[in-house]
Amino acid sequence: MAAEGGGKEMNEIKTQFTTREGVYKLLTHSEYSRPNRVPFNSQGSNPVKVSFVNVNDQSGNGDRICFNVGRELYFYIYKGVRKAADLSKPIDKRIYKGTQPTCHDFNPITATAESVSLLVGFSAGQVQLIDPIKKETSKLFNEENLADLFVLFALFFSLQRLIDKSRVTCVRWVPGSESLFLVAHSSGSMYLYNVENTCGTTAPHYQLLKQGENYAVHTCKSKSARNPLLRWTVGEGALNEFAFSPDGKFLASASQDGFLRVFGFDAAELHGTMKSYFGGLLCVCWSPDGRYIVAGGEDDLVTVWSFSDCRVIARGHGHKSWVSVVAFDHCTTSVEDGDPPAEFSGSDEEFHEQIHFGAGRDRANSAHSRLSKRNSTDSRPVSVTYRFGSVGQDTQLCLWDLTEDILFPHLPLSRTRTHTNVMSATNNTSASSNPPNSLPSALPRSNSLPHSSNPTGGSTPNSHTGSNSSPTTNAAFATLSLHESRKERHEKDHKRNHSMGHISSKSSDKLNQLSSTRTAKAEAAKTLGTTLCPRMEDVPLLEPLVCKKIAHERLTVLIFLEDCLVTACQEGFVCTWARPGKGLLSSQNNPGNSPSGTVV
């Protein structure tokens, strides 16, 4: 494992870490927080979230940052690795009564140096559209609150929140749109809105548009255009997060019932599903080329799912508590093209058409075109390494490398790499009902030790696995570990005191979580050992490239930028980690603010 040793070193807050590309360093003078820099008492508050947007400012300081801490919302110029943060001059600051910000998202299409569109979701179910540069609220739907400037007064809801009263868990602008946005709630519903429409003064009436396994999509019946345009009901329990594919055509959702569901967004059709090893899924993200999805949650694992094959291709074990955020690092993903002729590799023949990237996404388009090519006959196939990261309630940052030995495993008696038949049949029922997706009898394992003879290792939800494996070759940076049962060690190391979950001020959220937990236990017995949820010994187990404790409180943010990565913890501190060779700050840049106690 890449984690540190025990004792005092294990609890030490790290300010730098090393990967193959060099040393990442914490820039203490680029820390953003509340102006007083006092650690926030996070008990009973919603997770700290961070959003970025670039306004194409001619001065070179085009990045803007928004973050929420408790009842407060801050908007600053983000200076990154260039200059120290000046917390005394926020562009905008808002304080709310009776509700707390839970999430937010900028519209990158409409953003300019003079105006930005920022959506903010709240714990009481409201959604607000504001312009923090103009210090304006663009939409006013809750007129009774206009007398109090500190009370939330711009709502995409009717006066009594007739659409949904539960906590907003995720809000995103629809990619490529200036007016459409999607909102998820802890009720398990998602709503599609148009900023140009009103919500009406009566409860909306819906009619069924499309229905499938554990999901339904309804349209709003109305003589005139009104919000919401669509209502999605997905799974059971809270819908914790969703993410659009890089081309905006697909939508991945992570739910408290433990299911990852991937939909065709325009057609509202289910493309594929995956089940967590146990517990709910809390976070989800797409690879830059749209070929892979990573999800994390209450099983303390990161799970890699193939979009084209609709199956789990790997799991990662490094966290000791719930995984709160997963994100791909587009800057560190590397591709070494093979010799021509090159052709698309995958079991889905229509994959290339499904993942067709539109204009304005040159970087993703380039990455996709390179990553989707491989010489099917040459002995030197394309070399691929995806880098992604995760942070969790165990206060640890993990970095992972997903390499070609996992993505394109060699099959016996064949030199051709393929996505199919990598996992093997351990469930006869599943094999008979769905032969193409059955689990194989022998799992090919490159750069790993032989299979454990203990069939129970990892087969129960509470027995995590892991081992110390020898270093791999320079070409492959992902490490596979022997799947041995280490229940005693796991119980000792597992810090459930960090697993605080999504704290909500609404009792209905807690009831929903209890109900979904019971349902999840019943579903786990049905899905374990199938392609929805392979057993631990049936898929490769990744070990983290880096696993470092970087905060005192649970981590809630991980964002990869061009010259740095950004993390945030529940104390309200937003930290900047300079990439190798990018840390230009020195003590001379310090404007006089002392660094907080959250990092040492």
Image (tube, grey):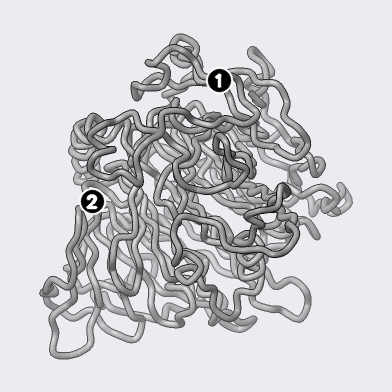
For disc 2, the neighbor class at 10 Å (few under 14, some 14 to 19, many from 20) is many
The location of residue 139, given as percent across then percent down, is 36, 80
Residue extending furthest toward the top: 488
Number of the front mark, 1 or 2? 1
Q: Are marks 1 and 2 in contact (CB under 8 Å)?
A: no
Between 20 and 168, the residue placed more toward the observer is 20
Residue that appears at 20% across and 74% down: 158
Residue that appears at 35% across and 69% down: 265
Between 541 and 440, the residue placed more toward the observer is 440
The location of residue 128, given as percent across then percent down, is 37, 70
Residue 395 falls left or right of residue 436: right
The location of residue 351, given as percent across then percent down, is 47, 64
- What's under tag 2, amino acid-wise? Gly
Total marks placed: 2
Say which residue label 1 marks.
Answer: 482
Tag 2's secondary structure? loop
Q: Quadrant of the C terminus?
A: top right
Residue that appears at 35% across and 49% down: 260
User: Splitting the image into 4 quarters, where does residue 190 fall?
Assistant: bottom left
Tag 1's secondary structure? loop
Q: Is residue 187 above or below residue 350?
A: above
Say which residue label 2 marks.
Answer: 235
- What's under tag 1, amino acid-wise? Leu
Residue 190 falls left or right of residue 462: left
